[in-house]
Image (cartoon, rainbow, N blue to C red):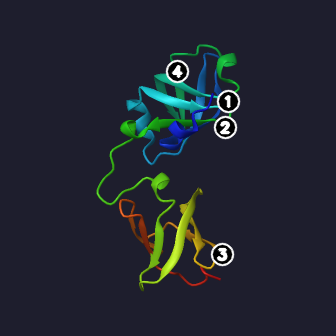
Amino acid sequence: MLDEEKIADMLRIGVVTKPHGLKGEVKVFPTTSDPERFKDCDEVYLVTKNELLTLHVEGVKYFKKQVILKFKEYDRIEDVENYHNCDLMVTREDAIELEEGEYFLYDVPGCTVVSDEGETIGEVTDVLETGANAVFVIKTNEGNEVLFPVIDECILKVDVENKCVEAHIMDGLMD
């Protein structure tokens, strides 16, 4: 059974794309800024349609932009072939330590967005992860939805502790 409350406080570090080989390994698309972090993962949580599974990392390999993981719990391809598109999560305690000025994208929804001119724009409702950069989905005070790219020219400061994002409104963003 899925424990939605427990999952809500976890951080996604990857998505299983497909099995790899015959011995229960899976290919994972990393969603973490540091794919090397998988080497230090002992325990991860796999979110399936019906349950939250606790898995123990036994082996880590890298191939192109993907991570190949072997879990102690599985030894056959048949054991893992139904995990396509399942999220791999870690608890906050197992998350990588952030440097000064860094934040988890997970913590941004709910933050108030204020322009560099002091005008309140709205609230971040979601974060889209694209290939180039993340995008903040913002519900404006007028009820519209606008998209702000998470680039230095647009997002000037993110303060998740105070739930505030300072942004520069680039031409065309509010149209």
Horizontal side, residue 129 vs residue 59: left or right: right
Q: Which amino acid lies under the numbered mark 3 shown in the image of this protein? A: Asn
Specify the quadrant of the image occupied by residue 46: top right
Q: Which residue is mark 3?
A: 144
Residue 142 rendering spot, x and y as whole percentages? 62, 79
Residue 28 rendering spot, x and y as whole percentages? 57, 35
Would you say residue 64 is visible in this rendering?
no
Q: Which residue is mark 2?
A: 85
Give the mark nearer the N terminus: 2 vs 1. Answer: 1
Q: Residue furthest left?
A: 100
Horizontal side, residue 61 vs residue 17: left or right: left
Specify the quadrant of the image occupied by residue 127: bottom right
Q: Which amino acid lies under the numbered mark 1 shown in the image of this protein? A: Asn
Q: Which amino acid lies under the numbered mark 2 shown in the image of this protein? A: Asn
Q: Which residue is mark 1?
A: 50
CA–CA distance between discs 1 and 3?
34 Å
Specify the quadrant of the image occupied by residue 118: bottom left
Work out whether residue 133 or residue 103 is closer to the camera in this orientation and state it: 103
CA–CA distance between discs 4 and 2?
17 Å
Horizontal side, residue 84 vs residue 94: left or right: right
Residue 48 rendering spot, x and y as whole percentages? 64, 31
